[in-house]
Amino acid sequence: MGLGRTWTVCLVGLTGHLVEVEAHMSQGLPAFTLVGLPDTAVNEARERVRSAVTSSEVVWPNRRTTVNLSPASLPKSGTGLDLALAVAVLVAAGMPGQDVAARTVHLGELGLDGRLHPVRGVLPAVAAAVAAGRTEVVVPAGNVAEATLVPGARVHGIEHLAELVRQYGGDARVPQLVTHTAARPVAAEPAPDPDLADVLGQDEARFALEVAAAGGHHLFLLGAPGAGKTLLAARLPGLLPDLSEPEAVEVTAVHSVAGTFDPAAGLLRRPPFEDPHHTATPAAVIGGGSGIPRPGAATRAHRGVLLLDEAPEFSPRVLETLRQPLEHGELVLHRAAGTARYPARFQLVLAANPCPCGKGVGKGLSCTCTAAERRRYLSRLSGPLLDRIDIQVDVEPVTRAMLALAAAPESSATVGARVAAARRRQAARLAGTPWRTNAEVPGAWLRGPDADLPADVRLALERAMDRGALSMRGVDRVLKLAWTLSDLAGHDRPTIHDVGTALGLRTRGGTDG
């Protein structure tokens, strides 16, 4: 009778769970049984492991083998458990190095020829192992650059199962096709962010974009085709400051799980930008799939920008599923196989035409839509969704007179410097709180004694509520905008002028129920 133990990590969402892999061998008919809630991919590992072991010219044990994945109540998914299964079985069969294997975490997918293939989610998996006190980690050579981003991890990269067997003192043949020095991947040069200097005119929309960037606010751009809505939205990420170290690790972990991370470039330092097509399904936008759900565009845009161009053309199911992350900054996806939590604190930008023909605003535009068609078109953006959008701006078409009178447009670097200064003021004011930007601050704090609002500011908001121009949520949104305007202007607290400007940005000159 033989018993082998080692460790691996199973991801549920972005949360890594340490899993003990136990292999037990006994007399009886030859069999290989996996227990501990394995999914289809983990069950199929039995054939991959057997082929990889024999391809390494290691004798496969002709005995009854049972492998337990503990905790047994946790659903196990993915192919990253292959290497740990192989190590546990070989140790149970008598391979040396059982003490080393029992304190090492093994991650990686095995090919039939014994080669080790990279897997998704290595960064959060290694981080979970180190947090649990397991610092010795073996990963595929292709994942070494990513795994070494985790402080405190002692990472060992291998290309073939036979290499690991030899390191543990076993007898195996390393094929000639394996090179012992992995070639370092070359990082692709990141594309420069589009520059705001490309946008001509549109002073009001440019100002709204600056306010949105400074406070982390959501933005709704309504205007005719060709007015510059998409052009403006695509330049919002270029105004945002670089991610802090904790934010960079968080965002990189998301993209590692999603399979969109290039480890050669190191941690992601710039805010991400996602712009799904309007035919995207709810699963593509918020995440989904069989088994444990995968992250969607909303999670990949975490700490960045999610643009929904032609927003009324999106499915109502897609639009309404965004209400939860807009409010809480997190997506909780429930499936039969388990529940996954993904961070989703993004800035939402909605861009829309005013009507189906797109000519419902601006001078000289002949709209062919009826009033009922215009109402029906914009009603696809529900009131509860728009109530969560802080800034709502009409983007008028640029005329020749506007271009003649307009000054030279400011660049993203110039505007970004003002945004960074406003973010620093927010960081100083919100130090010691769990919030980083004005958009994240709850209404209770904004209306409480900590905010120390001037009396005339409170009176102006109360009057707007009495007129029905603002709901309670609208008051909170206006206060957040007023604080951002105050930060941009360098004030200690919002003035009555800041509140008036915030009301204009919030209501598009109308009312907010």
Image (cartoon, rainbow, N blue to C red):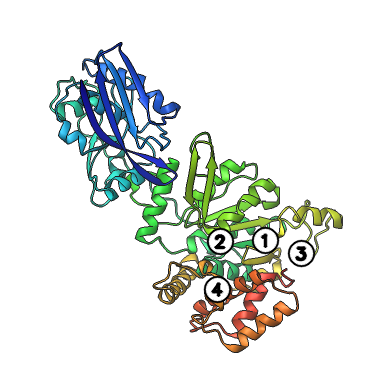
Kind of residue at disc 3 = Gly
Kind of residue at disc 4 = Ala
Location of the C terminus by quadrant is: bottom right
- State the image quarter where residue 225 is shown: bottom right
Give the mark, 4 or 3, whose residue is nearer the N terminus.
3
- Give SS at disc 3: loop
Q: CA distance from mark 4 to mark 3?
A: 40 Å
Q: In the rendered structure, are the residues bearing label 1 and label 3 in contact, judged by CB atoms less than 8 Å apart? A: no
- Residue 362 is labelled as 3
- Residue 159 is labelled as none
| In this view, the mark in front (2 or 4) | 4
Give the mark, 1 or 2, whose residue is nearer the N terminus.
2
For label 4, the crowd category at 10 Å Cα-Cα, with few meaning under 14, some 14 to 19 and many 20 or more, is few
- Residue 444 is labelled as 4
Q: CA distance from mark 1 to mark 2?
A: 28 Å
Reading the image, the residue beneath label 2 is 198
Q: Is residue 68 rendered to the left or right of residue 275?
A: left
- State the image quarter where residue 481 is shown: bottom right
| In this view, the mark in front (1 or 4) | 4
Q: CA distance from mark 2 to mark 4?
A: 40 Å
Q: Is residue 188 rendered to the left or right of residue 86?
A: right
Reading the image, the residue beneath label 1 is 386
For label 2, the crowd category at 10 Å Cα-Cα, with few meaning under 14, some 14 to 19 and many 20 or more, is some
- Give SS at disc 2: helix
